[in-house]
Image: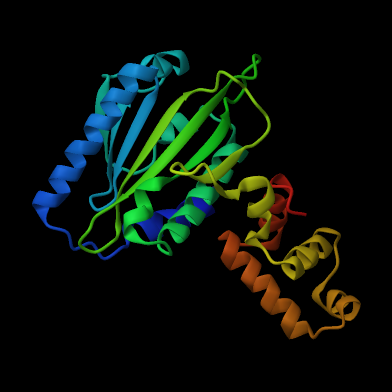
Amino acid sequence: MKAIQSDLNEKLLQQEFSSTFESEKLQLQKCQEIAQHFVNLENGIAVLSDLQNNRSYVYSGKLADALGIFQEESTQEIESIWEEELFAKLNAEDVLQKHLLELQFFQFIKTIPFEEHKDYCVVSRLRIADNPNQQTLLHKMFYFTNPDDKNVELALCLYHFDFLNSSLHHGMIINTANSSVIHQTEAGNSAFLSGREKEILKMIQDGKRSKEIAELLFISINTVNRHRQNILEKLRVRSTVEACSMATRLKWI
């Protein structure tokens, strides 16, 4: 999970920000108001991450009390864009899927006109870990870009109980203006690795070595090794053992 989060962290924080202080301040204030209104209305948790300054503002409703987190005060500032105290209460695989979806959302938002950025968000269903009642949270995340450099400046995450407790989906990127689904985790995240990469990873999991894989697939050992390296780089892991473990948990192989 840390590998995908690290990749997303790098892309979010290493943008070339160039907006003016006044425009940053106005957008931050606007989003802070949205976060506070959400918490007051939904009894949820809102996390507003300032990507330029690598800090977050956490607004806690009664959901935080139920989970036993963010108890110091109803509004607090943390020196990170990650709400690790909340992630620790959630199913680790769901959090991994959430981060992967957000990474894909970041890449997608860069491909559409700036004026349409506000129409899109990520929706994720997150299981609460070690919960006998099988309670889940519904998470929505919005990226806010600035008009000067078109970079993603703020990320607003909204959490509340998933009262419907539906297992129909785990996550998606949606257009809130016309209800279209841009990407779903079940259908789309498995494409994070190519078909050949998944084939080779499954063979590695079955104990086959590069020479044997090359013979079975009628490709060179150099090609097999290049695929192996691509898999490690994509998943940001150090070994094929870790890659197999992650891909299995995500049901990619």
Which of the 4 image quarters holds residue 78? top left
Q: Residue at x 22, y 58 (%)?
A: 147
Q: Is residue 30 above or below residue 36?
A: below
Q: Is residue 12 above or below residue 34?
A: below
Q: Is residue 27 visible?
A: yes
Farthest residue toward the right?
216
- Tell me residue 141's x, y (percent): 42, 40
Q: Is residue 88 visible?
A: no
Between 248 and 181, the one lying in front of the other is: 181
- Tell me residue 205's x, y (percent): 80, 58
* Structure colour scheme: rainbow
**Is 40 situated left or right of 196 in this image?**
left
Farthest residue toward the left?
22
Q: Residue at x 70, y 53 (%)?
A: 247
- Tell me residue 16's x, y (percent): 26, 66
Q: Residue at x 62, y 37 (%)?
A: 170
How many numbered marks appear? Answer: 0
Quarter of the picture containing the C terminus is bottom right
Between 81 and 45, the one lying in front of the other is: 45
Q: Residue at x 55, y 60 (%)?
A: 236
- Tell me residue 226's x, y (percent): 67, 78
Q: Is residue 113 above or below residue 156?
A: below
**Is 139 situated left or right of 145 in this image?**
right
Between 82 and 29, the one lying in front of the other is: 29
**Is 248 situated left or right of 144 in this image?**
right
Farthest residue toward the front?
178
